[in-house]
Amino acid sequence: MKLTDVIRRALVTEKTTVMREGQIVAFEVAMGATKVDVKRAVQQLLGAKVAEVRTSIVHGKIKRQGRFAGQRPDWKKAYVRLSPGEPVPEFLEGA
C-alpha cells in the first residue's frame, strides 16, 4: 500500500480541535491500513515523529428515504499522538 493511499483526509471537528492541544491528530485512513502503516505514513508525509497510534472502525449509519433503506459505508479512523515537543503540522493550525 502506498503512503499516499493510507491517509485519506484529516478530521477537523470540535473534538479533534481540542485534542490537538494534547498533541493528538485524527485522520481518516484506508480500511486495510495497519497501525504501522499509519505511523510510517505520518512520519514520512508530515515529517513529525509519532509516539502512538490508535485506530477504530466507524460503522456506517442506516439512512432511509421513504420506505427504502440503505447503509453508508464503514470507514476507519486513526488517532495519532505526536512525540512531545513535535509541532502540529501547519495545515492543521488554522482549522
Image (spheres, helix red, strand yellow):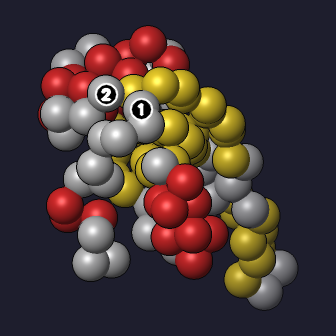
Q: Residue at x 73, y 72 (%)?
A: 63
User: In whole angstroms, how far apart are the C-alphas of marks 1 and 2?
Assistant: 6 Å
Q: Mark 1 points at which residue?
A: 83
Question: What is the quadrant of residue 40 in the picture?
Answer: top left
Q: Mark 2 points at which residue?
A: 49
Left or right: where 91 falls relative to 19: left
Left or right: where 65 falls relative to 89: right
Give above or below for 69 relative to 89.
Answer: below
Q: Which residue is drawn at 28% across and 49% down?
A: 87
* Quarter in which the N terminus is drawn: top left
Q: Residue 43 carries which label?
A: none
Q: Residue at x 61, y 32 (%)?
A: 55
Q: Residue at x 19, y 61 (%)?
A: 90
Q: Pointer 1 and pointer 2: residues touching (CB < 8 Å)?
A: yes
Left or right: where 81 falls relative to 58: left
- Residue type at mark 2? Lys
For label 1, the crowd category at 10 Å Cα-Cα, with few meaning under 14, some 14 to 19 and many 20 or more, is some
